[in-house]
Image (cartoon, grey):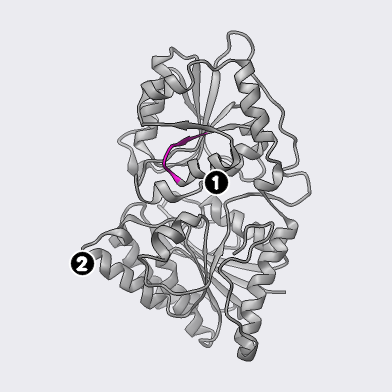
Amino acid sequence: MLDVLYLAHDVADPAIRRRTLTLEAGGAKVTVAGFRRGGDTPSADGVIELGITRDGKFAQRIAAVGKAAMVLGGKLRGVARPGIIIARNLEMLALANRANAIFGGDIPIVYECLDIHRLLLRKDFAGSTLRAAEQYLGRNVSLLVTSSPAFIESYFRPISQLRAPTLLLENKVIDLGDGTAAKPSLPRPPEPGAPWKIGWFGALRCRKSLKLLAEFSRAVDGKFEIVLRGRPAYSEFDDFDGFVKNEPFMTFHGPYKNPEDLAAIYHEVHFSWGIDFFEEGLNSSWLLPNRLYEGCRYGAIPIAMRGTETARFLSAKHIGLLLDCAESAELARLLADMAPARYLTEFDRVAATGSESWVFDRADCQRLVNRLCALHANDAHPALMQEPSQTQSNKGGLL
């Protein structure tokens, strides 16, 4: 069995739990160590807590990482020597190197980077310094894991100085074949006179999306309602709760469990908001968000912004609705003739793609763990190492 030490930037992030479930389903034993994001964030059972960080406070996070590095040996006392160390985000890569040294200095490190922070893309001294830090901290990285081809094409190949084999691991829905994600998707047009519903689920961090959706729902006088679920990044909003409370056609239902609640929450809506302007033109244009896979898996028609990686992805599959510009009037035009007949046509296109496009099953989990085991084996037996392929793919989206 492969022992994995997973270093998490935010132990309450649902993505951390999903990755842990994925690794465990593939046969690995996972120990999670990481930070709580804010003092009110509960620490999950069995997690080794390294401290508290603040969302959007980059300097404070650097200081917290430095402090954690000094006490990491004590925190990991009693933890079995891992076969692999996975570092989620750049700040955890620093701790991965420290943990590696604690355990003898010869453990393969996997760098999991599912977002490209805007500071890494700056052309000034701060940007070049951060990229140099990424290069230095990544000097011992055996594998880079990322979730969108655009991250590779737009950052890691032309800009980043990190040089490591790459694994493309899409943000697919975990389906372990035990009923957690097996409920079939059926069309569900609204009853006559009832509104259409657009679901915006997951990491809610985009002020522009919130404002646009509010303006749109008011402009069409509630013919479309906006349903919000997930974890708002309160640091990005002046008053998220107050704003939503004052909107007549917008509701927020709090967090949900992934993958357990996905079928229920997506079956309550007709469309999935796949647009993010948080780092417009950069990370937001390159990512393939979790909600893209979740919504399509459960028959919610995706809405994406033209010119983004999400739009290109949907266009290749001939599904979804594409918004030409970020204006409520344009969204109203896009959805102006929405009726059951058009909805059923769009729904059938999504359903015809099949679940394989959207799910990561138990066999995929096993393939992932086998890939990580190969890193461990190669590290133990350097003569077995070969040049990695950047283009080899399989059903699970591995490169």
Residue found farthest to the right: 178
Say which amino acid is labelled 2: Phe
| Gap between marks 2 and 1 measured at Cα | 33 Å
The residue drawn where x is 40% and y is 43% is: 233
Of residues 180 and 374, the one drawn nearer to the viewer in this rendering: 374
Q: Relative to 389, say whether 127 is above or below.
A: above
Residue 350, x across and y down, in percent = 64, 34
Q: Which residue is mark 1?
A: 290
Q: Residue at x 30, y 36 (%)?
A: 238
SS type, badge 2: helix
Q: Which residues are magenta?
A: 303-308
Query: Residue 47's quadrant in the figure?
Result: bottom right
Q: Which residue is mark 2?
A: 125
| Quadrant of the image containing the C terminus | bottom right
Label located before the other in sequence (2 or 1):
2
Quadrant that contains the N terminus:
bottom right
Q: Does residue 246 appear anywhere in the picture?
A: no
Q: Is residue 57 left or right of residue 108?
A: left
